[in-house]
Amino acid sequence: MALKDLEDLNEIHLDALQEIGNIGSGHAASALSTVLDRRVNMSVPCVKILDYESVVEQLGGPEEQLVSILLSLGDDVSGMIMFLFHKQFANMILTTLLGEESGDINSLDEMSTSAIEEVGNIMAASYVNAIAELTGLRIDISTPSLSIDMAGSILSVPTIYYSNISDKIIAIEEELGQDDLHAFSYILMLAEVDSLEKIMKSLGLEA
Amino acid sequence: MNKLITVGISDLNIARNGDELITYALGSCVGICLYDPILRIAGLSHILLPLSTGYSLIGNQSYKFADSAIPLLIEKMERQGAHRYRMKAKIAGGAQMFASINNSDLANIGQRNIEAVKAVLYSMNIPLIAEHTGKNYGRTQKFSSDSGLMTIKSINRGEIIL
């Protein structure tokens, strides 16, 4: 049976996605830990298929301010990948990388902006490389793009992108932590249904 | 006590008797406020995409697109006694949230939403009297059935009343 919709994904598919999410975010977290030269703890990621409103609610409501980095995926897999962090976590990244209080997250200078984008880039590259290695598929990523804004506004982008396929989003939820700071973060992996099918096939699963 | 009626994404609703409508965190989506100043009936529609061509409009799917949602909002207001020849429109949203997205369809979706909304309003002879659109940031949009005023709130930009 061919996948038509995300709702067609069965338990086995979800387990596979969970495992991919697990491996991908494990690599992303260890890349982050290398960049920051600090230990980054990570909870076991949890894959969920959620609609827009549930994702927004879990992130703290539509007006919650978030830091997000978006990259598009190309080649064998088309889609996008989005990292979402709360402000405190972005502040920690900036303080660690630039060695000073970054001040207000709302008025980032060019240096801080590119520092956060670069972290997104490195995390996304490790995430995607892990999946590429696992599946044998070629996956390219675009340059990262940063937005610091309301959760609802940020999530309108993947929702629109996805709306011709499904009202649901595949969200990989995890907690990245460092010492006493625990930051709830989300990685949204947004692959077109036929790309998901390719991923499933490459893992030897009938889609 | 006036009520605050929340309009979700891909949703629409109307308010009267001083009640207010609110839709949170518009990104590339567009929020369309319609107002009949005589009966003080307000309507708000939160659309995601410009055109419904090629989509099957089952259930609330019609609320998702500019070309199918706006006529439905007008009908809903007319069932309460409003008249389209008295209606005026105010719109907000249609931002480009991320600067560089390779996917060109997505890159200018905000702009295409704005244009589609304007075209629908024009074709239905409803004058657009205020807009707060484009740029690269999110907006929460509130609309009062008492005054017909639209309030736009963005992070660190305060409130603007139009």
Image: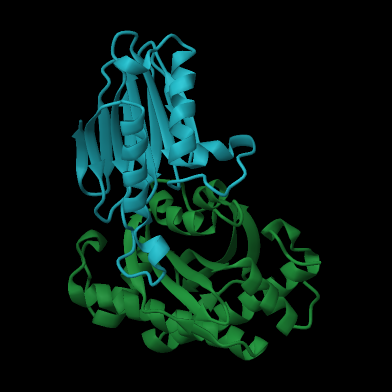
Chain colours: A green, B cyan
Q: Is A14 left or right of B27, judged from the image as shown? A: right
Q: Is residue B151 above or below residue A197?
A: above
Residue at left 71%, top 84%?
A202
Whole-percent x and y of residue A125? 47, 84
Where on the picture, by quarter, is residue A87? bottom left
Q: Is B146 left or right of A59, judged from the image as shown? A: left
Kindly give the residue lying farthest to the front in the view shown. B123
Q: Is B56 left or right of A125, judged from the image as shown? A: right
Residue at left 39%, top 31%?
B22
Q: Nearer the viewer, residue A85 or A190?
A: A190
Q: Is residue A53 above or below residue A132?
A: above
Q: Nearer the viewer, residue A173 or B109?
A: B109
Where on the picture, by quarter, is residue A20? bottom right
Whole-percent x and y of residue B148? 27, 21
Residue A95 visible at all: no
Whole-percent x and y of residue B100? 32, 70
The quarter of the picture where the C terminus of chain B appears is: top left
The quarter of the picture where the N terminus of chain B appears is: top left
Residue at left 74%, top 80%?
A201
Whole-percent x and y of residue B97? 33, 58
Q: Is A101 left or right of B63, judged from the image as shown? A: left
Residue B40 visible at all: yes
Residue at left 43%, top 31%?
B70
